[in-house]
Image (tube, coloured by chain):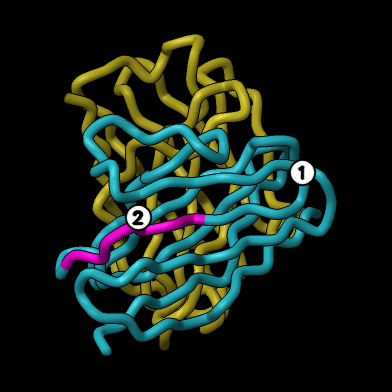
Chain colours: A cyan, B yellow
Amino acid sequence: DIQMTQSPSSVSASVGDRVTITCRASRGISSWLAWYQQKPGKAPKLLIYAASSLQSGVPSRFSGSGSGTDFTLTISSLQPEDFATYYCQQANIFPRTFGQGTKVEIK
Amino acid sequence: QLQLQESGPGLVKPSETLSLTCTVSGGSISSSSYYWGWIRQPPGKGLEWIGSIFYSGSTYYNPSLKSRVTISVDTSKNQFSLNLSSVTAADTAVYYCARHPLSTRPFDYWGQGALVTVSS
C-alpha cells in the first residue's frame, strides 16, 4: 500500500492568512493526488484533482502543486468558511489511501 | 445532479454482518466511466477506503478488510451494497458511498454518510 503522510496535523491561522499543507507519498504517484475539505458532520468535498486541477465550483484561492512523492495544498487568503479538516488521497493505484488529515483552526 | 444516499441499520451487534445500500439518482450506475465505492470514518478519525465496484461486478477491496467485505451491484435498482461480516466495535464509523472515474481520478460525488454503531 502507498502511505500518505500529511503535515502539519493541525494549524492555527487567521482570516486572510496564507496556509500551506503538505502531503508526502511513500512512493511515487505521478500527479494522481487529490485534496478534500471536510466540515464537521459533512461528507468530504473534492477541491483539487490530479495534483493541481481545481474542481468545478471551488474558489481560486485554493491551489495544489507537486508530483512524484511531494505535494502541497495552498489557501492563498483564508476565509471564515475554510476552517475545516483537509485530506489528501492518492488515486494512482488500489488500494486508495488517504492522509491522516490536517485541521485548520481559528487563531 | 447526481445524488447518492446510504441506507441501512444504524446499530449492529458484535459478530454480526453490517449491511448498507447506496441508491444512486440523477445518473446511471451502469455507466462504463465510473466505479462506485465505500469509504468509512470512525468517530473523530480519518478516512479509510473499503472497496469499489464496477457495474459489471468487478471489484477492488482494501486488503486490510478483504476477508470480511463483499460489495455488490444491482443495476436494475441503480444501487450498490456493502456487507461487512464479523463486526466489532472497531467497525463503528460513518460509512460513505461515493463515485470515482475509472482512471486515476478521485471521489467526486459522495453520499451524506450513515453512522453505524457496533454494540450489543
Toward the viewer: A62 or B118? A62
Q: In the rendered view, tell whether residue A29 sits above or below residue A81.
A: above
Lower position in the chain sequence, tag 2 or tag 1: 2
Disc 2 element:
loop
Mark 2 sits on what residue? A44
Q: In the rendered view, tell whether residue B59 sits above or below residue B34.
A: below
Which residues lie in the magenta part? A73-79
Q: Amino acid at mark 2?
A: Pro
Residue drawn 59% across and 74% down?
A: A7
Tag 1, which chain?
Answer: A
Q: Is residue B9 left or right of residue A79?
A: right
Q: Position of residue A23 (x, y in %)?
A: 62, 61
- Residues at marks 2 and 1, CA–CA distance in whole angstroms: 24 Å
Q: Residues within 10 Å of mark 1 (few under 14, many from 20)?
A: some
Mark 1 sits on what residue? A68
Report which quarter residue B28 is drawn in: top left
Q: Position of residue A97 (x, y in %)?
A: 64, 54
Q: Is residue B7 left or right of residue A96?
A: left
Residue drawn 49% across and 46% down?
A: A64
In magenta stretch: residue B66? no
Q: Amino acid at mark 1?
A: Gly
In magenta stretch: residue A75? yes
Picture quarter with the N terminus of chain A: bottom right
Q: Position of residue B25 (x, y in %)?
A: 21, 26
Disc 1 element:
loop
Picture quarter with the C terminus of chain A: bottom left
Q: In the rendered view, tell whether residue B57 sits above or below residue A64.
A: above
Most extreme residue toward the right is: A27
